[in-house]
Amino acid sequence: MITEEFARFLEESQDCLIREFRKSVILSEWDLSHEAMSQNIVAMFHLVIGYVMDKNTLEDVTQLAHKVAVERIHAKSNIGDFVHNVSLGRQVLFQHIYQNDACVKWGFELLTKISNCFDHFLTQTVTRYNELKNTDLEEKQLFIDQTHKDRLTLLAQMSASFVHEFRNPLTSVMGFTKLLMQEKPDLPYLDIMMNELELLNYRVTQFLLVSKKGHSMQMKGPILLVDLFEETLAFLYPQIVDVNVEIDMRIDPGLGMIGYREEIRQVFSNIIINAIDAVLKRNGERVVWIDVKREKEDIVISIANNGQPIPQDLLPVIFEPFVTTKELGTGIGLYICKQMIVRHEGTITCTSDESLTTFTIRFPLPRHETDEEERK
């Protein structure tokens, strides 16, 4: 009898309760309309009445909760606003109940049952909302990953075609230029031409490595790092002079590694070229520091510059393909560097602030050197 009286009271109070609720509800620009929200509130009140009278179960509450969760996803609304609004609806309902003289007669058990119904509705809605949100994010991430792979595949295909069409005539021009340098060493500008051709060949080689056809043509061998850096700097000498950059090089002369010489040379060249580009806009002293030393069982190579810093938001993705700080950059140089370093069981990291940008490469020491150190 008391339960039926209580349910009748709720039914008679429905219009008043919805009016009170709508006065203070939070409704954002992208949220559900007042009409749609009112329909859900009416449905919720009917569920509460049915639940109090044991005509509805928590499964019925769950069905409404899942419906509301889908609506919240489609509306791109804030789940926090929803939690606030449901709690507000419960508060409006309880205040109305407490103002009735029969409140004491209805008893604590009925009020607890209503509260449990609201709690279940909130829990089920938020849980379902999070599930749908996570599924949506996973689908978007899969799409991004697939798009990323498609771009890399396309780049590899374009690179292979580009290298095939371009490498042969470039090799011929370089060969004939070398012959001219031998036959007519006093002919002006040949050294400049040769240097530009070598730089062009370096760029082509980058695309060759993207197409994954350059790796199979190489043989691993011993690399003395001081010699490789000197060779790289000699290759980049015209750019170093043109930009007027100081090279501060400190290398342990005995440090070496086993690897693909051309790949490691590509890595050093790319990072040093980037460093030269970074200091180009700097007024005053322009410096690139090269430091190579041993730390325990690693060879640690640091290449730093005092040029323009890398934006902080780009640092976490600086080794991803198509990420670049240059206006005309392709965004594949550092990506290729990382691939080649990983192929040598190494790692590369980058730090950057207003005073210094540093690329740090770590390679494991050759096994025989580690064994010798253990014997000592």
Image (cartoon, grey):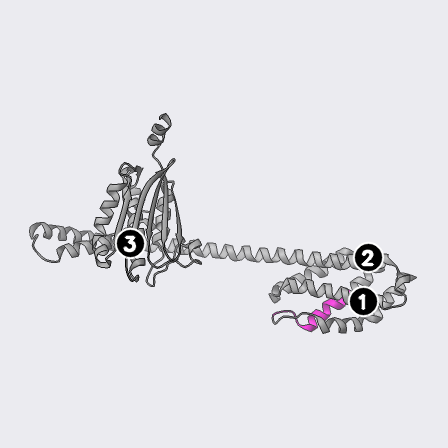
Q: Residues within 10 Å of mark 3 (few under 14, many from 20)?
A: some
Asked whether the viewer can see residue 20, the reply is: yes
Name the residue nearer the viewer: 71 or 353: 353
| Left or right position of 87 against 49 | left
Residue bounds of the magenta highlight: 30-44
Identify the mark nearer the N-term, 2 or 1.
Answer: 1
Looking at the rendered structure, the secondary structure element under dot 2 is: helix
Badge number at residue 112: 2
Q: What residue is rendered at 38% in x and 40% in y? A: 345
| Residue type (three-letter) at the residue carrying disc 3 | Val
Looking at the rendered structure, the secondary structure element under dot 3 is: strand
Residue at label 3?
A: 287
Residue 227's spot in the image, x, y percent? 24, 41
Q: Quadrant of residue 35?
A: bottom right
Name the residue nearer the viewer: 173 or 164: 173
Q: In what quadrant of the picture does the C terminus appear?
A: top left
Identify the mark nearer the N-term, 3 or 2.
Answer: 2
Q: In the image, is residue 34 part of the stretch drawn in magenta? A: yes
